[in-house]
Amino acid sequence: MPGQAFAIIISVLVFACVGLAAFGIAKLVSERGAGLRRLERFSKPEAKSKPEAAGPRGADDGGKRKHSINELIRSILTAFGKAFEGKQYTSKIEKELARADIPLRGSEFVGLNLILVLVGAAYGWLMIGHVLAGFILAFVGGLLPNFFVRARQGARLAKFDAQIADALVIMSNSLRAGYSFLQAMDMVAREMSPPISEEFTSAMKEMSLGSPTETALAALSDRVGSEDLELVVTAVLIQRQIGGNLAEVLDNIAETIRERVKLRQEIKTLTAQGRMSGVIIGVLPAALGVFLYTVNPEYISVLFTHPTGKLMVGLAVFGELIGVLVIRKVVAIEI
């Protein structure tokens, strides 16, 4: 029935919003109080002794309630993820979460996926009363966290790549000033903003704990997943083996990275029309279908009731997916 189809579409959108909100809450919970520890570190001692500096009592009570809710959500994720601890695939998931800067364990992320799948299936089956709606919402619930991780990875990687050239300039100037390579890395970790400062700080901690420089740099490149950083690490490792002017090498790599960034921006401008065509192809048929259903439900109800109409809808969805994938493949030019 068209009414059931429309209800399924609305339920998918609502569940998508709820899933994103739940994942955002889980991310906030997983911070483990890092922000509070940083505030305490830089807070003034006299501010702690004064009652006024602590803020109103209502704000303190609100913070306690928020902390208790966060602990509850954290315990739920831990309980659902216990069954997946120690699995091989959880270590791969943790690597992807680290690239997205999401401080969750792999087992907790799998538990979050399981929760969203169960909630989606229960909502579709019990609230809507349709088994197909339960399957659709369960599928969407399982995909939402993965889409969020991919989006965070892309945003963080783009920001990291935009910082590499400046970091190399800082390192080359530090080397010319007489600093060692490790001191130059520490300069980047202290002077630049995240995410590159966080990654360099992690590499410095590994080296301070006894890890060889080559191993720490290789782990840094593998953890970030940036092609530009891989080029830098390869050049540094070669220079440490055969010698040479490292400052000049870093300057040359920085210039190469700047040219690549400039070329990427030009390609992005030239392919804007193709990417817009992909968006229109993906959105226009669905928007037109919703509009026709709102204006004249009897006119479009044949697509959902007649066998030929159902076949046409299925072929249309398949054709949409193929068209979007083809356009994305055409406009994705590797540099």
Image: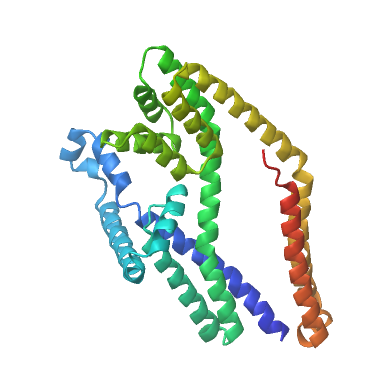
Is any atom of residue 334 visible in this view? Answer: yes
Q: Where is residue 73 shown, x and y percent of the image?
A: 34, 65
Q: Where is residue 124 shown, x and y percent of the image?
A: 55, 81
Position of residue 276 in the picture relative to residue 215 (left or right): right
Position of residue 168 in the picture relative to residue 61 (left or right): right
**In front here: 278 or 263?**
263
Is any atom of residue 293 visible in this view? Answer: no
Q: Compared with residue 82, is residue 280 higher up or lower down, i.e. above or below?
A: above
Instruction: Identify the residue shown where x is 50% and y is 67%.
Output: 18
Instruction: Identify the residue shown where x is 68% and y is 80%.
Output: 5
Instruction: Identify the residue shown where x is 45% and y is 61%.
Output: 23
Q: Where is residue 159 shown, x and y percent of the image?
A: 53, 38
Q: Where is residue 230 shown, x and y percent of the image?
A: 51, 36
Instruction: Identify the residue shown where x is 77% and y is 87%.
Output: 305
**Image quadrant where residue 80 sits:** bottom left
For the N terminus, the quadrant is bottom right
Of all residues shown, which one is farthest toward the top? 177
Of all residues shown, which one is farthest toward the front? 242
**In front here: 170 or 136?**
170
Position of residue 222 in the picture relative to residue 80 (left or right): right
